[in-house]
Amino acid sequence: MADRLETSTDLATTSDHKIVCAQIRWDEGEGAKVSRKITGWDIDGLKSKEKEEIYKKAQNEWKDKSSKRPVLNENSSGDDLQMEAEWIQRNFVNHLNRWCKKIKVCARSKRWWTAEISENRKILGLIKRARKKGEALQQQVKKQRSTLRKMIRQSKTETWRKFLTSATRDQVWQALRYTKPGGQQTTKALRSRSGEVAESWEEKAELIKEEAFPKPLMGVERKAQEVGGEMWKKITDEDIREALFNQSVQKAPGPDRLGFKVIRLLWGWDSQRIINIVKASFRLGVHPRVWKGAKGVVIPKPNKPDYRVAKAYRVITLLNCLGKVVEKVAANIMAEECEWRRLLHDGQFGCRKRRSAIDVVGRLMKRVAEAWGRGNTTAVLLMDVKGAFPHVAKGNLIKRMEEMGFEADLVRWVESFMEDRKVIMSMDGKEGDSMDVEMGVPQGSPVSPVLFVIYLSGLFGQVEEKEKECGSEGISFLMMWYGWWKVRIWGNAHNDWRDALRKRQYGHRRMPVSLTLKKWKQCCLLDEERIRNRR
């Protein structure tokens, strides 16, 4: 791919035209490997009626193998937990390789490709070879090629119509995305903040990694309590089952390729092993190392003006699905406790059940109307948290969870969950070496939104302490969701609302987050009817 185009003044021509020079890059950097072709296994095919006998043999063989290895119990140690997680991953992958058809996805994999098309493609190849030997005519080649192309067009049309007629509610929007043109296939050369150009695969991956997984902020150094906590005793078998079956089988698996269809298959064969490893993880406050590795897929953000900067790309983190079951259990427990004990601010709408953006708009309209009724002017300040999930500081989060009274074993698990994380960058069809992630919670984990809400919950009080200093009549935190933190401020008409908002902008310096000042928005909402009456 041509990374740079520039005109040359050194090379003379006989006309007024200039020579355009292009730099073409061949990416084969050290450490970059071609992505694995095997992306999973055909679980539906294994469970079909045609393979019922094979399915029973595979099930019996796994149960026989599993019976020779005892499940974890209340006396198991942290090392036992680590070895159990590694044993399940390694042995179940080998078991599926033995009994299940592998799914291989490549650049030519298409839904509309059928066995009939494959057969006609082979026939075309035979006729072409016969033509070279003088045993077939060119007209035969043209006729077979025309037949193959017609067959492909018909298969594409039938597949598209079948998809549209059987599309579910969510797939309707997926069909809309299919009609839009695809993005670029290769990542362009990137510019660092110092102006240096990253051209090789490794240099670009490092730049994107620094943007997506920043260095730790100056936060509180805090360690979780080493003993105590009985939260794990409250976890039921049904809680674990719901955490597994409430997650979509369409979610992409992590580096181990064990998706939720595979984990559900394992549950049907060996559910007690999954139940015990989940409970042991919380009892010991340990998230196994094998679940901390992730695959970071780099994709361009839509509608960005310049794709030569690292922030124009997003890293989608693909995590191990068995680890996601544990994370989902933790997320449900923390969310329920926050609601039951009313630990979150009343204005917190994001990441909470039975609260939506419609409720936010309703609250906004109500507060504006009330302020206008009292003859006040309503001022609004919208604040953006920079890179929300990647900027969560472990020490600050642990301190906040202890202040909110969470069980010690749950806090220890969160500490372990955030430590020693690694990511393998996947970009332009290649994978690099494992990189350390020193800060934040992974984007794509079920527990990350809840942890982020807890992390920022202590900031509401800090900001509201500034109320008198800003001269505001009242403050309402209306919505915060994932990467955005939105704050509404209702100012008194007798004060200069612009001065109040300007003072407010510098109140974030003591907060354990990084705010993007360029994205802050300020506006003043005025009652047009009252203004007309004054005239």
Image (spheres, rainbow, N blue to C red):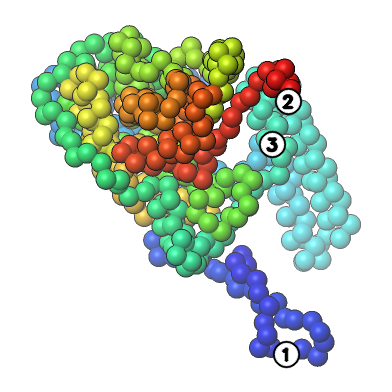
Secondary element at tag 2: helix
The residue at which mark 1 appears reads as: 12
Percent x, y for residue 284? 17, 26
Q: Residue at x 73, y 25 (%)?
A: 164
Q: Residue at x 41, y 44 (%)?
A: 295
As drawn, 147 above or below 202 = above
Q: Residue at x 89, y 57 (%)?
A: 139
Secondary element at tag 3: helix
The residue at which mark 3 appears reads as: 178
Q: Is residue 476 left or right of residue 115?
A: left
The amino acid beneath tag 2 is: Leu
Q: Which mark is residue 496?
A: none
The residue at which mark 2 appears reads as: 164
* Quadrant showing the N terminus: bottom right
Q: Earlier in the sequence, mark 3 or mark 2?
A: 2
CA gap, disc 3 and disc 2: 11 Å
